[in-house]
Amino acid sequence: MMIKKLNSSEKLKALGEGAKFDVCGFPSIFTKKEKKFQRFGFIYPAVGKNGSCVKLFKVLQSNACEGNCFYCANRKDRNFPRVEFSPQELAKLFLIYYRKGLVNGLFLSSAIYESSNRSEEKMLKTIELLRYKYSYRGYIHYKILPGTSESLIEDASRLADRLSINLEAPGAKYLKQLSPTKKFSSELLEGLKKIAHFNEKKPLRAGITTQLVVGAAGETDKEIINFSSKLYEDYKLWRVYYSAFMPILDTPLERVSPCPLTREYRLYQADFLLRRYDFSPEEIHFEKDGNLSLKYDPKLSWALKNPQRFPVEVNKADL
């Protein structure tokens, strides 16, 4: 695999575009789109839990990948230019945008080239430069790659505000349909256990998260919500992010229909009920096919199924 030599601006365009498939904020359907940032593909207007907008410099260290995930734009067998930043180059480039007030923080991920540890070491060097050489004290969301060693995860936990690892699917049988080379238990779940361990030992300022791809492998919303509920219970995740599958040209799943954005939206609404309102998965109503209603908000679906609970005196009712 040949790494193409480009200038920093050209790299940023390519590696900012490549980072868009990682989700780290509420979907745009929840809020007004930040149109003024759309011309910068690498500036991501992530919406926080209080509705505020956090502008993240969202980028890959490299898009050169040894993996061949069926849905991924960076898969090994896809024909497109491979580029990468050196740690020094990326750190200095981020600081230019940060000091101009164009971004509030960094979201750093990478494809896996040669090995997970080699790729992780380059990312780690980037944030070490930011923290130690340039005294950057702002927000860093740092992606842990499948198969990363525990020592590197521990190093990252000392420097980042948030750690995340993408589980991609709610179980091994669905992951095989997306990425036959990734190991669900020994790589992905084990990685999540490790970052959860370090978060418990010394809590990160913005916790730990994961991401699931929705609608590419035939999984149901019921399976997703049950799985997410278990992740919240077992690993104390800050949030599970849901990424509606969108087919990409020159991948094995290019002819698979895209996931409706409304389905992604309903999953986030159901997820709020789990995290904020203490619902159990059993209390959430699913259609006969195991999916959430696209017509009704999950709260309304629950209310329609529980008429005996109404009317409610809102001034006296508990949560």
Image: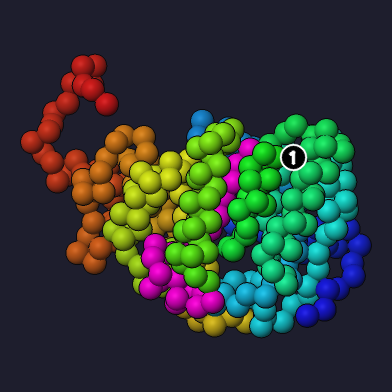
Where does the N terminus fall, quadrant-wise? Answer: bottom right
Residue at 62% from the left image edge and 59% from the top image edge: 148
Residue at 83% from the left image edge and 37% from the top image edge: 132
Q: Position of residue 26 (x, y in %)?
A: 51, 45
Taking the image as shown, residue 51 lies to the left or right of residue 272, namely: right
Q: Is residue 200 visible?
A: yes
Quadrant of res 109: bottom right
Quick one: which residue is furthest to the front in this view?
151
Other-residue count near label 1 (Cα within 10 Å), few / some / many at <14 / 14–19 / ≥20: many
Q: How many marks?
A: 1
Residue 179 colored magenta?
yes
Residue at 39% from the left image edge and 62% from the top image edge: 170
Taking the image as shown, residue 51 lies to the left or right of residue 129, namely: left
Taking the image as shown, residue 231 lies to the left or right of residue 71, namely: left
What amino acid is found at the position of numbered circle 1 in the picture?
Answer: Val
Where does the C terminus fall, quadrant-wise? Answer: top left
Q: In the image shown, does 150 or 195 lie closer to the viewer?
A: 150
Q: Is residue 56 visible?
A: no
Q: How is the image coloured?
A: rainbow
Q: In the image shown, does 250 or 121 lie closer to the viewer?
A: 121
Q: Position of residue 203 (x, y in %)?
A: 55, 34
Q: Position of residue 55 (x, y in %)?
A: 68, 40
Q: In the image shown, does 297 or 70 lie closer to the viewer?
A: 70
Q: For mark 1, what is the residue?
A: 103
Residue 94 colored magenta?
no
